[in-house]
Image: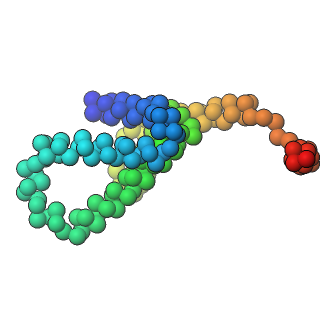
Amino acid sequence: TLAGVMSSLFVSLNSIFTKKVLPVVDDNHWKLTFYNNVNASVLFIPLMIIFEGDIIMAAQEQLTSSAFWSAMSVAGFFGFSIGIVTVLQIKATSPLTHNISGTAKAALQSLMAFYIWGNQPTVMGVLGIFTVLGGSLIYTFVKMSENAKNAPPPQAPLVQKEQEMQSKV
């Protein structure tokens, strides 16, 4: 439970800091992702050596296999892609919206696991999943209502064309 709480805390903090730091990199998601990946490489390589050095040395033969590097390349591509999409979603919406959509996705994946993998559902587990999905649905409805109130009224196509013609003159 502590690991789950800490995970949620750090995911939330990551979203908040992503939104806060985007202006520093001129709202450029490519720059932010580059900096994140460089920082992760610099920080994690020494940690891997310290905490997993003996396992890495024992698996040295596997580290040279093409199957390992193919799997690592595919995982790296998808990880990088998820990072880009995450930054774009936070940039377009908010950290809260990103966290709610991530939680809803995880709940939906848990629901799918019952069917795909034959996991045994518990009453509390199913209740939790539907609570998350229901809360996410309500949040989406509220945000859509807020956005509809704040949106400018739609203009008739004829009025819009007249305004475009006048602005060209």
Work out whether 19 lies above or below 59.
Answer: above
Residue at x-position 34% and y-position 47%: 37
Q: Residue furthest bottom?
A: 66
Total residue callouts:
0
- Regarding residue 109, the answer to whether it shows in the image is no
Work out whether 140 lies above or below 57.
Answer: above
Depth check: give the residue in front, 133 or 94.
Answer: 94
Q: Is residue 59 left or right of residue 21?
A: left
Place of residue 10 in the rendered image (x, y in percent of width and height, measured from the top left) = 35, 32
Residue at x-position 47% and y-position 39%: 25
Residue at x-position 32% and y-position 46%: 38
Place of residue 106 in the rendered image (x, y in percent of width and height, measured from the top left) = 43, 44
Place of residue 150 in the rendered image (x, y in percent of width and height, measured from the top left) = 72, 30
Q: Is residue 153 left or right of residue 21?
A: right
Placement of the N terminus among the 4 image quadrants:
top left
Residue at x-position 11% and y-position 65%: 61
Place of residue 137 in the rendered image (x, y in percent of width and height, measured from the top left) = 58, 37
In terms of image quadrants, where is residue 2? top left
Depth check: give the residue in front, 157 or 2.
Answer: 157
Q: Colour scheme in the image?
A: rainbow
Work out whether 58 lies above or below 134.
Answer: below
Q: Is residue 151 left or right of residue 94?
A: right
- Regarding residue 168, the answer to whether it shows in the image is yes
